[in-house]
Amino acid sequence: MSEAARGDVLEAQIDQWRGFVRRRRAIAPSDVEEMEDHLREQIADLGANGLDHEEAFLVAVKRMGDLDEVSREFAREHSHRLWKQLVLVPEADDGAGGPSRWRELGVLLAFAVGAGLAVKLLFTTVDDEFAQVRNLAFTVLPFLAGWFAWKRGVTWWVCAAVAAVAAVPALAVNLYPFEATPGPFPAPGMTDVLAITHAPVILGLLVGVLHAGGNWRSHDRRMDFVRFVGELTMYLALLALGSMVLVGLTFGVLALVDVDLEPFFEGWLLPFGVPGALLVAAWLVEAKKSVVENIAPVLTRVFTPLALLMLVADLVALLVNGPLTTVDRGLLILMDAVLVLVLFLLLYSISARDPLAPPNVFDWLQLALVAAALAVDAVALTAMLTRIAEFGFTANKTAALGLNLVLLVHLVWSAWLMLGFVRGHRPFAAVERWQTTYLPVYAAWAGLVVLVFPPVFGFV
């Protein structure tokens, strides 16, 4: 293995160690960088004495005596390597942190109640339904961002910078003179819909800045945010399903005694329950990471082959649907949604994978998934260009075309890097780093759709 390849493996090992350290409640995020510097110094000293990169890394972690519990957990997850012999230490009591966990939960519940009150205020003071929908994300996500700012101890100037950036799309969606679709039942115009659907992408990535403690340049912290989003989606789905069953049973029981629960449901349960579920799910992800990390690889292995079959079916549907000019616009929109879903699955699979594990059959399956997504994207892109050439540009066609191009670049380079990995030509860290490097592109594209598209297309 070349010196550059050994260096990449070492960086992947340090990234993985950093992730384990940062997940410990007893270690403040501000201390992680200092500890990493100390670890790197230890590795350099051991390397100067003749140890190779892997040996130096293992011994350096062992020497960091203040991290016994972290080392034990790291050893448990990687017992197939030398961790069990080199760094496995006796179990430690986890008595510390109990009160802090309750304090954290109390702060979280305070933010959840605040989000519910804000949503309730929005729906009671704003009569325009379009305005309510436009501002829903701007009403809820700041409370999630505030909780992360408190939890990570983010500096005030980082919070101020994030708030200033978030204010730009907030002002745009509220001050732009969007035109409603004419008719007996007015509906939002296309640029209005595009702004409503793309603004939460900007806000979500800004929440990621605070989730990373302000250190958004760190690839490892960006990947942690990707992992957080995937796990948050899992918990939200579980909470939603459980809530639907509970509310449905409650409605049924009270209906038998002629009690109408609908006013309470619309007036109080929805405004407080939905944002509350979001923040509680975020707290669960942060508090139960070890459990979710055991579930995540299983889920990715279940859904990756299913997604591959779905993409193959979609590709066949596009190819047999006749000339590309006759492909239904709704089908193309659905194809975009499918590609975004596949992208989320790819990111989540990469975030859940052990970067030090050698290539296996599942990695080839993921490569096939990306290849199928590229084929679907190419066909959909060709259909969109054909329709634009025949019917001209509109806001939604341009947005769909731009999204397909953004996805195309992401998927092409991901496929190239994954091919190199499964063939043993490059480390998995290169595949992982590309995903986090490309994230700001989605923020830039969403900002373009929210801020530039409405005036360019006449706010229609």
Image: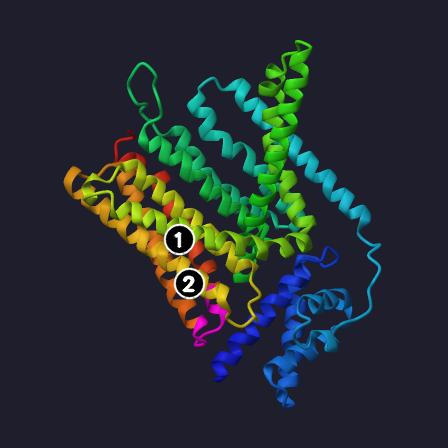
Q: Which residues are magenta?
A: 422-431
Choose mark 1 or mark 2, whichever is in front: 2
The residue drawn where x is 54% and y is 75% is 9
Q: Position of residue 138 (x, y in %)?
A: 51, 34
In the drawing, what numbered circle is on residue 257? none
Instruction: Give the image location of residue 208, x and y in percent.
Output: 54, 49
Residues at badges 1 and 2 in contact (C-beta under 8 Å)? Answer: no
Identity of the residue drawn at 45% across and 65% down: 364
Asked if residue 216 can be seen in this view, the reply is no
| Residue marked by disc 1 | 441
Q: Residues within 10 Å of mark 1 (few under 14, many from 20)?
A: few
Q: Earlier in the sequence, mark 1 or mark 2?
A: 2
Residue 424 belongs to the span the image colors magenta? yes
Q: Which residue is mark 2?
A: 367
Mark 1 secondary-structure assignment:
helix
Indicate left or right for 386 with 31 as reference: left
Q: Is residue 289 left or right of residue 338?
A: right
Q: CA distance from mark 1 to mark 2?
A: 22 Å
Q: Quadrant of the C terminus?
A: top left
- Residue 351 location, quadrant: bottom right
Residue at horizontal 65 percent and vertical 39 percent from the top: 280
- Report helix, strand or loop for mark 2: helix
Residue 283 included in the magenta stretch of the image: no
Residue kind at label 2, given as amino acid type: Leu
Spot the residue most to the top.
258
